[in-house]
Each structure stands twice: as C-alpha cells, then as structure tokens.
Image (cartoon, rainbow, N blue to C red):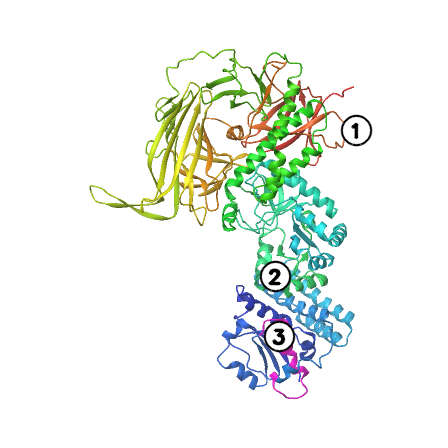
Amino acid sequence: MTYNDIVILIPCHSLDDFPTELDEKEAESLLNAFAVAWHPELLASTRVIPSWHRSDEPPQFLADRLLLVPKTSEDWLPYGWIEEAEANGAIVVSGKIQRDEYTAAALAPLHSTDEAPEADAAETGPASAVEISSELVADFYALGFCYIQLELLTRCMHHFSSLDEATIQREAIAAADAALANDEEAARAHLKACFEVLLENRERFYPIDCYLIDLCLVAPEWANDSLQAAIADEQPLNLLITAQDLETVAEQNPELISVLKKSCENLETEVIGGEQEEIATPVIAVESLIWQLQAGTETIREISGRAPTTWARRRFGLASLLPMLLHRSGFHSALHLVLDDGVYPDYEQSKIHWEGADGTILDAYSRIPMSAEGAASYLRFPQRMAESMEEDQVGALMFARWPEVKSPFYQDLKRIHRYAPVLGSFVLLNDFFQNTESSGRHSSYDAREYLSPFLSQLVAMRKPDPLSRFIDYFHRHDEFTAGRWFQTVAQAIYGKPIQEEALCKLEEQIEHAHPDAEEATIQAASEALTGFHEAGVSQLSEIILQGADPAQPGVLLLNSLSYNRRVVVDLPDFPHEPEARDYIKATQFDEQRKKAVVEIPGAGFVWLQPGKSPAPTVKSNVPIAEPLLLRNEFFEVHIHEETGGIAQIKEYGRKPNRLSQQLAYRFPYQRNIPRPDPLGDWDEKTPYAAIRGVQAELTCAGPGMGEIVTTGELYDQVSGNALATFRQTFQLWRGRPILDLKIELNAQVKPEGNPWDHYYASRFAWGDSTASLTRSLLESAHAFQGERFEGPHYFEIAEGEERVTILNHGLPFHRKTGPRMLDSMLVVEGESRWEFQFSIALNQNFPMQLARNVMVPAGQFSSPAGPPRMGDQGWLFHVSTSNVQITRVMDLKQHESNGARSRNGFAVRLLETEGVHRSIKLRCFKTPVSARQRDFHGKTVVELPIEEDAVLVEMSLYEIAEIEIFFEESH
C-alpha cells in the first residue's frame, strides 16, 4: 500500500501551546514522532511533507493516512477513536517511544505484500525495504526534528511562520527519491537545500548568528572510546576537566591525548577549566587558589598544547575575587554557573561582564546548561533559545554532557549543524567570547550572594571531620607559609634563586593536601612538613646573627608577617624574665609557665636576652584577674556564673556590653520547655539545650596574665539527660588587646543529620541589631547576609566606630540565628575533634592581620650568640599601610624589555585585605633602582616609580599584585 498523508497528533490545541514540561518518556515519544515522519520511504510514498493535528479533535478523513500518536497524546483522543480510524483505512501508530519502534510500525504496511493485518505485517518487518544508509536516514530524521524546532522557535519569538513549504516539500521529496535510488550525493544536496530554506526562515526573525556550546564533562573513568570519537568528530567540542584528571588520562591513555592534542591544534577542541584540582573554594587560603590556577594552566598547556582561556568548574567554586585572579592568570572568560550545588546569583545571560570585587571585568557565560541526554531538554529548547535571543546580546545555549550521549536529539543538532546553522552554530568557548559582540550588562556580584554546599555535602557523604579538616588545612598551610617566608627571604638576601626545586616540591605536596584530600595525601604532606618551619627559622636567624657577640645567649624572634604583631612566646630556658625592652609588653614567670608578650616589627626580628636576676615585682592598683573577671588596659571580661561563658566584654567607663558568649547544643527541631510562673505556667519554644553545674576557677592572677577556667554540662531540659560536659579557658594578657578562649567538649550525645540544624556551637550575642557584619573570605573582608555564611579567619561586628572581632582559627561555617546572635559551629555529624580555639579583640582596625597573627606561628631561635650586630630589633621588608600585606617572596620572571638578560632582584606578592584603595610605599633591605608590576605569567602590568628607598604602588581594593624589585648589578 501507499500513504496519502502523514499526520502527527499533538497533545495541545496548536503549536502555540506546545507542551514543554513532560517526563522523559513522553518527551522522547513526542519528538521522535516528528523525526520519524520524515523518513525517506514515507516521504516518497506520500509525496507531501508531514503535518500535525490536535489530538482532541482528530482528522475526519482517514483512508490511507498514517497517523502517529505520541504517548502523551493518547489521553487526548476520543474514546474508541483508534479502532474507528483503523476500521476506516488509517494506519495508527501509537504507544511507541523509540525511533526504531516508530519506524518499524510505520513502514510495515508499505512493505506488506498482502492485506494482512498490521500486526502480522509488523512481524515480518521491513524485509522488503529498500536498503538506505542509516546515516542518510538519520539526516532525514534531523530534518524533521529541525522543522518542528524551528516552527516552535518562531512562535516563541512571537512571529508568524512564513516558511516556504512548497520549496521544502519539493526538495524533501527529491531527497527521498534520491535516497531510494541509492544516490546519496544527490539526496544530501537536496537535504542541504531544505536546511538552507529553514535557515532563511530563521533569519527573518533573528538575522544574526546564534550559538550552541557543547560542554563535555570528563573524568578519568570516562576517558574511553566515546570521548575519543567525540574529539575526532571535527565539530567544536569544549572539554571540562581538571588538570589532575587530565594528567591521569595522559598516563592511562596516551593515544587519546595524541588525538586531543591534534584536535586542539586544529582548533576543533578546547580544554576549559584551569585548576589543578577543584578544591573547596572559597573556604581556603587565597595562595592555594593562585597555586591551583598556575599549576593547572601549566599542566593543561603541556598536555593539550594550548593553555586554557576559559575558566570553569563542575564543583561549586565561585567567589567575588575570581575575575581578578583569573584575569591575571591568563583567562579572558569564565562560566559563571554551577553544575553542582550551592547558592550564587543565577541571573541568566549568554554573555555578561562579570565584575569582581576589585573592579576587574571578565566576560562570562551565565545561562544554566541544558542536559544533552534528556529528551525533556529538547522540548524546552525553543523556549530557552527564544529567551536568549530576546534577552541576550548574543543568542546562545549550552548543552552539558558526559562523553557518551545516547540521545538521538543531540545527534540531530550535530547533523543540522553540518548542513546549516539553523538552530545555532556549534562553537568553541574561546571563539564565542572572542568573536561575538560584548554584552552591555555589567554584573557586579557581592560576596554575600554566594554560599558553598561543602558542609552539607561532606556530612551527606559521611566524610570524617567535616569541620576540623579545615582547621587542620589552615594549620598546615600557615606553618608552611611561615617556613617558606624565612627560607625565601634568606635566599633573597644572598641573591640566590628563591624557588628551589625542593621548595616547589614541598609546596605541591602541601597544596595537594587541601581539605578534601585523601588521608594518605594529607599524612604524606604533614610528614614532609616536619622540621620545615624550624629549618627556615634557623637559616634566616644565622644570617641575621652573623658576627654577633658569642658571650650573650638569648632568643631571636622572627616575624613572617609584614606588619607589627604582638605574640605570646614560651621561654622555658630563661631562668628569669628577659631584660626589659620597649618591645616586651608583659611577662608571666611562675611555677607553671615562663612566657612573655613581645611586639615584633613587620617582616622583622627582635632579640630577647635573659635577665640576670628576677625582675622586680611591679604592683598594680588594678589586678589583671579576680574571680569571674579578667581585665587589662584595653577592656575587661566578665565571666557568667550560670553559663560558664562570657557575660560581657566591655571597655572602661560607662560603656555598654560589646559581646557575650556561651556554648550551645542545637536540636534539629523546636521543643516546648515548661516554665513555671506565679501567674501561670507557660512553654518556652527553643531548639537549644541548657547549661547546668557551672564551676569557675581563677587559675592565674598575674602579674602579666590572667586566666579563668569554667566547667559545666550541657543537658536536655525535657528529659534531663546530659548531652556533653565542657571546659572553657579564658586567658588575657597585659599589653595585648586579645582575649584567648580554649574550648574542650566531652560529648555523650553526638549530632546527626543536617549539619546546619543539628550541632554543637559557640554562641555569640551582641547588643545592636543594626550592627554591620563582616567576615573573611579568601583572606579579605566581605559583608554577609542571610542565616548561613562562611568565614574561616574571622567575623566582625561593627557598631559605628566600635568593633568586635571574633577570630575563629580556621572554623569556617557559621549560622546567624537572630538579629543579634550567631552560632560558630564546632561539632556536626562525623566530627571527631573536641578542642577548639577562639580569640576576641576589641577596636582593632585590621581584622585579617589579627587573624593571621593568632594563626601563623612566629619564628623562635635559641642562640648562644647575640644580639645581632644591627641592633636588638629591625625589619627586612616594610609596607606603609596595614591593610596591605606581603604574602610571599618569589623569583623574577622573564621581562620582555630585557630579553634573556638576567637581572638582580626578586619579586613579592601583595594582598589588600580591607576593600580600600591605598597608595603604598614598599621598602626592603636594599635600595631598589627600578620596579614593575607583573601579572601571574610575568607580563608587565605597569612600570613603578621609585621614591628614595621605596617602591610606590597603587593598590586597588582587594587587589593581589606581584611586584618585581630590581637592584644594582653586583660586580
């Protein structure tokens, strides 16, 4: 038999209300019906192109018509209509999903040699069918898919369809005839004419190019034949892979890497990403992120032959400082989107100007990718593309996928692209960003608009120590950072190469031991770090102490931070207090301890020499410690006798309470606590446990230090059962504006489930609900909003000119539980650490410097000879403003103006921490003759002026700058 017509019954009244939200099976059935209707045998039989009709009012004339009923349309049909249609001579294909199912059922009557029922004919299959290339048939299917997509897109763009159906019909039938005649070249020529007619129609309502971005997600286990075939396909392909995973693929499959390298050279494939590993950005040190970017780009360049220019991640890793870091690492674009979880500003545009916290602007793509595998994505394709065409400067959609894609609709898009870019041209991200018009929209996203999912993910995956792993990471990193400073400064003083191979290898180990690293990697890094800090201290101390008097032993203290700091040092070998100096602010020498508070110049040193006899006792009218009270010249601390926490911290005079603190256990739900009252009992609703059995002990009453220890028990008010016992140690020194708090817990009940709702915490409260709240992120100050936030170094409460800074020693996750209360989370499910530290400071202007002060160890070197010939104290580097700090000393990089000629000097990296523009003067132990600012690849940003012995640098807010300093050539 032959067909007179092919009709697809659609589950709607017209294409204007075509469904976009169907489940996968229904979506696949619907779209496949439109594709299969353009099979060449069906076109050759009907001599007309397929049409559609609403299912609730199906066509009346049915003889010799092929009616395709998608699964979702069946419920729209009148009762008994299918049987009636078949009785009237129609062929009805229903209940099918896959293309081969549709095809077999639709072609069976054409191949039947008798008037057997359809079921019998279907059993015989297309045995007598004309043998047509499967690739050519797939091209016809792509034409049918393209036809319906363009019709839907036209309506989504609010245009009337003006398709030249006569030409389409003529060329499609000619292509079908050629296919049946086994003339593939002629068939494809006619198909190309069809696609060009469709392209002409699309250009009537969107006359400029639109784009499709193929984003292939790659992991080592997916580096298989499917990936190699995708790379060899010669169509633009963007591979998202970390540098570490790419290294693994290179080791396991060198042949695939050869194919990749050739494809990258031919500009057919682009590797995007840029980081060595996808670590827990932004809850890390900023130096770790810089290292990841530098190591990652270099690894990708070595393996693929081209450095990445577009940054992207599968895992959450967005931050407001990224545009500046990416720009200076050689990236010109980024994907501002999340393929994982987390909170971020998800305003969707194909191309935005992403403005970082420092003002750096980077082109970015922010539209959420569509799944290349899901059929439902292709139902939404016209709507999503229309949104991009109408709202964006450049119409573009991205498809995310794994290397192996089974969806026929994704292959349809590829086939359409080979004939004509009707629905969009596939493009590499580098070409997309470089060759398309720039967006007029500037998107300046604040740090408070981002929140990582790391804590919830760690608990959900049953990872051990979801909180203390960050504390341990910062401890390792800070110890390494201090040791590296001492060693590199010692090398710089002698003009030797700074970044020696052993140092680079150790840094690589430390950076691989990030918070998400495997235990073996962390253990190896910790072992490699053993003795490194002490070796650096010894190396630099020996240089400073050269030629010192051998008859005067003492201790040399070194400061790896570029600003003055007051540290508590342990002097167990001193028989008496050190000799009095201006930089010694307080001492505590008694039976239990021999300690002193010492101020060390920024990037400098001080010499401590033991006294020859005990220091005379200095009586103070105001003791530093009394029961439940600690005080020094800066503030006083009142301990609460019922909670064992801080009742109030306040300055002297009639100043209000600035901060209160207590330990807390939060249940995952509100509970009713009965409260007796003379006027009638009532229930208090609270998710928090209570405290009982508090005892306080004054353990040190001066003269230099005061210490109070409290103990108690957290208990469930409903059952009366104990939850945990605790011990809090409060320590305050004269001459030091910081209160140190050590917390020890012994839990009988451990939290389970959602870590944001069920935890032990240190709870803080303040008086002003309108106070400005700031936290650290990537070692700089950023405001926060909402209940949950991250801040591994500090959070600050500012009321006008008054500030309270809570230094949390690497604890990263906090929850604001009211307008004046905040929980700093200590223990959640899976946590095994039960000891924690906090420090609290009042009215200190530079909180990041305070945080680094309490976390980074100072260098301490016992020497039989001293003091240094240059004096009891001195500095090696000096920065004129406190909001800018030096983070490391580095080697020079190739300077384009001097070719290969070596120059005498070194480089330093500067970090602005407060979000304030400053003009600074940078000095060091030698007088410079010239200087320049470079990016992270060594390219000159600007030549810098010299004023006497200082380099003048303009630091914008949150800027990270590398400064090369040159000296006179030594002869």
* Amino acid type at image mark 2: Glu
Placement of the N terminus among the 4 image quadrants? bottom right
Q: Is residue 343 visible?
A: no
> What amino acid does circle 1 point to?
Arg
Q: Position of residue 818 (x, y in %)?
A: 39, 41
Give the structural element (helix, strand or loop) at label 3: helix
Name the kind of residue labelled 3 in the image: Tyr
Q: Is residue 270 above or below residue 445?
A: below
Q: Which residues are magenta?
A: 96-119
Give the CA distance from mark 2 to mark 1. Answer: 55 Å
Assign a secondary structure to mark 2.
loop
Where is residue 747 drawn, in percent x and y? Answer: 41, 42
Residue 358 at x, y percent in the picture: 58, 36
Label annotation for residue 901: 1
| First along the sequence among labels 3 and 1 | 3
Gap in Å between the C-alphas at discs 3 and 1?
A: 72 Å
Q: Which residue is mark 2?
A: 373
Residue 99 counted in the magenta span: yes
Residue 194 % position (x, y) = 70, 68
